[in-house]
Image (cartoon, rainbow, N blue to C red):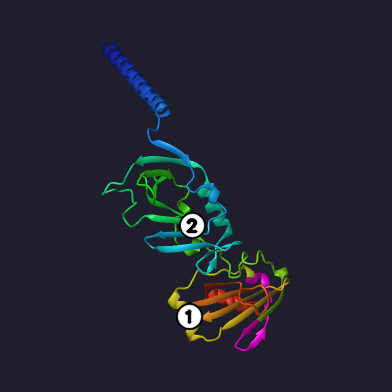
């Protein structure tokens, strides 16, 4: 009798478990069905952030956030960020991203006074672009809870939109994120190789020498832009450069690097002048800072 009773209970429990498993499986399948059939109720617009007709006529970008501001200027054959040439690859990618057609989802017709969207709190990111005839501004706020989208609006409307996060990498005012990294630009006069350099001259403490490995010099990178006070102090304290390097190219263009010490033992300032003809005023001048490590590398390749 006991075995029969236990067997009956076992069978009954199995049936309950089977029914429960079937119920849970049905709920699981139903959740997918609802997910697939549900529609996004937000108003969607397919558009670009910048009209494609402006692609080749943009004269400048002004970027601003809580940490500071940055201006990127179109010089015709290259862009500049502050006193440095800007990375051509990054600028092309940035502009292409702005003119790409994407989905914008309208989430509000106006911003509430206590909005948590990050568009009016002082932490927002402003992106202004200008042409000869017009200028427009885009304002970016916080990311959504999933960190896959970002809130944005324009200066001409109170409507708030949600866009994908593909533009996030460009929402920065850090010079290092925009500037071409090399001390000797590969943009101002175009790409330069060691074969393009016909003659070098180095003046250091009245000693006249030359560069033994020009490619190593071309590969060296700067550390960004010096502060205004730091630059003025270096130029006032050193009436003449610590080292002057002249590179004469085969097409008679000339590049002159003037290296000045700073108050810090670990940093130097490099003023790089690009001359289209010897003796002419510089076609372009960039100012960057380098570490003592980089300066020692320059000394190592000086004959």
Name the residue nearer the viewer: 148 or 283.
Answer: 283
* Secondary structure found at label 1: loop
x 39%, y 49%: residue: 156
Q: What span is colored magenta in the figure?
A: 202-217
Q: Residue at x 57, y 77 (%)?
A: 296
Left or right relative to 114: residue 256: right
Q: Which residue is mark 1?
A: 265
The answer to which of marks 2 and 1 sits earlier in the sequence is 2
Number of disc labels: 2
Please name which of the two marks, 2 or 1, marks the residue nearer to the observer: 2
Asked if residue 32 is positioned above or below residue 255 in the image, the reply reads above
Q: Nearer the viewer, residue 253 or 134?
A: 134
Would you say residue 263 is visible in this rendering? Answer: no
Q: Position of residue 174 (x, y in %)?
A: 46, 62
Q: Is residue 118 magenta?
A: no
Q: Residues within 10 Å of mark 1 (few under 14, many from 20)?
A: few
Quadrant in which the C terminus appears: bottom right
Q: Which mark is residue 130?
A: 2
Q: Choose top left, top right, bottom left or bottom right for residue 217.
A: bottom right
Query: Which residue is depicted at the point 47% across and 53% down?
Result: 169
Compute the Cα span from label 2 to label 1: 41 Å
Left/right placement of residue 236 relative to residue 216 reads left
Q: Residue 234 at x, y = what percent?
A: 48, 81
In the rendered image, the vertical position of residue 54 relative to residue 37, given as above or below: below
Identify the secondary structure beneath mark 2. strand
């Amino acid at each position: 009798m006991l075995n029969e009773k236990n067997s009956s209970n076992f069978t009954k429990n199995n049936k309950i478990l089977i029914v429960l498993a079937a119920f849970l499986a049905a709920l699981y399948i139903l959740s997918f069905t609802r997910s697939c059939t549900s529609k996004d109720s937000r108003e969607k617009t397919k558009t670009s952030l910048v009209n494609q007709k402006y692609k080749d006529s943009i004269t400048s970008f002004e970027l601003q956030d809580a940490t500071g501001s940055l201006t990127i200027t179109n010089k015709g054959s290259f862009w500049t960020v502050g006193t440095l040439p800007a990375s051509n690859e990054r600028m092309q990618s940035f502009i292409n991203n702005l003119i790409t057609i994407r989905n914008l989802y309208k989430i509000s017709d106006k911003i509430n006074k206590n909005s948590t969207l990050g568009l009016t709190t002082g932490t927002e990111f402003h992106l202004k672009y200008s042409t000869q005839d017009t200028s427009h501004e885009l304002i970016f706020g916080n990311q959504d809870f999933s960190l896959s989208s970002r809130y944005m609006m324009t200066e001409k409307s109170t409507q708030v939109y949600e866009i994908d996060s593909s533009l996030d990498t460009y929402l920065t005012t850090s010079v290092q994120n925009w500037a071409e990294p090399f001390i000797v630009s590969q943009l101002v006069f175009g790409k330069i190789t060691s074969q393009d350099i016909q003659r070098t001259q180095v003046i250091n403490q009245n000693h006249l020498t030359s560069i033994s490995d020009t490619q190593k010099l071309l590969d060296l990178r700067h550390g960004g832009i010096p502060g205004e006070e730091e630059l003025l102090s270096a130029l006032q304290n050193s009436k003449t450069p610590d080292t002057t390097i002249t590179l004469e190219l085969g097409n008679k263009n000339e590049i002159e690097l003037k290296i000045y010490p700073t108050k810090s033992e670990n940093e130097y300032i490099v003023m790089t002048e690009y001359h289209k003809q010897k003796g002419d005023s510089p076609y372009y001048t960039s100012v960057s800072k380098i570490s003592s490590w980089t300066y020692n590398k320059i000394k190592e390749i000086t004959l």
